[in-house]
Amino acid sequence: MKKIVVLPGDGIGPEVAAEARACLALISGRTGLDLVFEEHDFGGAAIDRHGVPLPDSTLDACRGADAILMGAVGGPRWDASPERPEAGLLALRKALGLFANLRPARIIEGLEDLSPLRFDISEGADMLVVRELTGGLYFGEKTLEADRASDLCEYSREEIERIAHVAFCAARQRKRKVTSVDKANVLATSKLWRRVVTEVAQDYGDVTLDHLYVDAAAMHLVTSPRSFDVILTENLFGDILSDEMSVIGGSIGLLGSASVGADGAGLFEPIHGSAPDIAGQDVANPGGAIASAAMLLDHIGRSGEARLLEAALEQTLGAGHRTRDLGGSLGCADFGAAVRRNLEQNLSHSPEVVEEGA
């Protein structure tokens, strides 16, 4: 039995999380994987019901889980709240020691038309952002006065070393190249970052390392995305670059992510926001949530099922079934149902996976 905590969150979060959960439930039922789901309040929904974005009951459940599936958090209705919904996400990452955020993006063969980039630029692009998640500006000391504000950016050698090892290990499973992104010509934290990453690289002689300033990296992402394999960077830079990277494949709604630590439960979520302007209208793209569910399956040791789910998502898109953000007309629920039909077929044609799960 594997315990999966589901945090639907806010805005379109409950809609997309429901479709991803349904995919996992289908796999569980067909393979005997025995996934058990628990749903808990989180983010703005938790503020409304409990007064805080991360209630103790939710945190306790996450600590006892094998994996966590999240929808989205935030929205303008909580702008006046003493504590914003996003604070719950930062607190959860910190409490569970989720220091590494993995955000893959690639051009799916046959779907190059979705990219805003020319075919000759985007074809074959396949990259992974490894973002440090519990340090930097987001967690530094903050001051806010009437005419002055500051945010402290701080990194330790240990924080940089551990995220660098994640990136180099990931590169060994891919094209064996790491691009470390910093601003070492200006920032002291980036100078330390570059020095420590270079030292860690000495343990990975089979992986090529290069360095880019963050402004140059932002430019190269849209002019030569195929030049990247694994992008290693700090918290703020990774947040911005991975959102930029998401449009290369056609929509931010297609990308999933994993936040993991040294051990224990990982957190799996689409990289898009809560999109409150379309919440409840059944027009959201659940592709990123479903991609996150595939990453969740990898995390709990079910790579066979993960590949079948990824294939089902790509088959659905390849057949022309697309949501509004991709120029189609399918609603969130109908798109999820189309993915599950393909998933059902994939499971039927892969008895070895079904037997392994049972």
Image (spheres, rainbow, N blue to C red):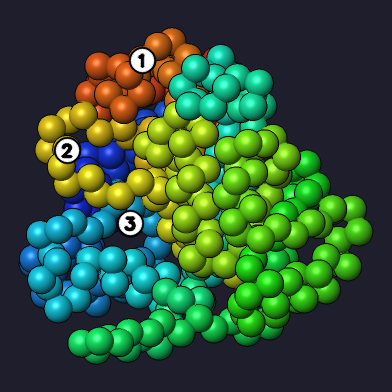
Closest to the observer: 113 or 163? 113
- Quadrant assignment, res 77: bottom left
The relative height of residue 353 versus residue 165 in the rendered view (above or below) is above
Q: Residues within 10 Å of mark 2 (few under 14, many from 20)?
A: few
Residue at 51% of width from left, 67% of height from top? 235
Question: Vertical placement of 179 versus 315: above or below?
Answer: below
Which amino acid type is marked by label 3? Answer: Val
Disc 1 marks which residue?
Answer: 321
Amino acid type at circle 1 is His
Residue 48 visible? The answer is yes
Q: Residue at x 75, y 76 (%)?
A: 196
Left or right of 203, for residue 275: left
Comparing labels 2 and 1, the label whose residue is closer to the camera: 2
Which is nearer the eye, 118 or 63? 118
* Quarter assignment of residue 155: bottom right
Q: Position of residue 134 (x, y in %)?
A: 49, 74
Could you give the CA–CA distance between mark 2 and mark 1, rounded to whole angstroms? 20 Å
The residue tagged 3 is: 5
Expressed as whole percent of the image width and height from the top left, the position of residue 122 reads 61, 27
- The secondary structure type at the circle numbered 2 is helix
Q: Residues within 10 Å of mark 3 (few under 14, many from 20)?
A: many
Residue position marked by numbered label 2 in the rendering = 278
* Tag nearer the camera, 1 or 3: 1
Amino acid bearing label 2: Ile
Pick whichever of labels 2 and 1 is earlier in the sequence.
2
- Report if residue 4 is visible in the image: no
Horizontal side of 310 relative to 57 (left or right) equals: right
Which of the two residues, 249 or 344, is positioned nearer the viewer here? 249
Measure how far apart labels 1 and 3 are at the Cα level: 29 Å
Q: Residue pushed farthest front? A: 147
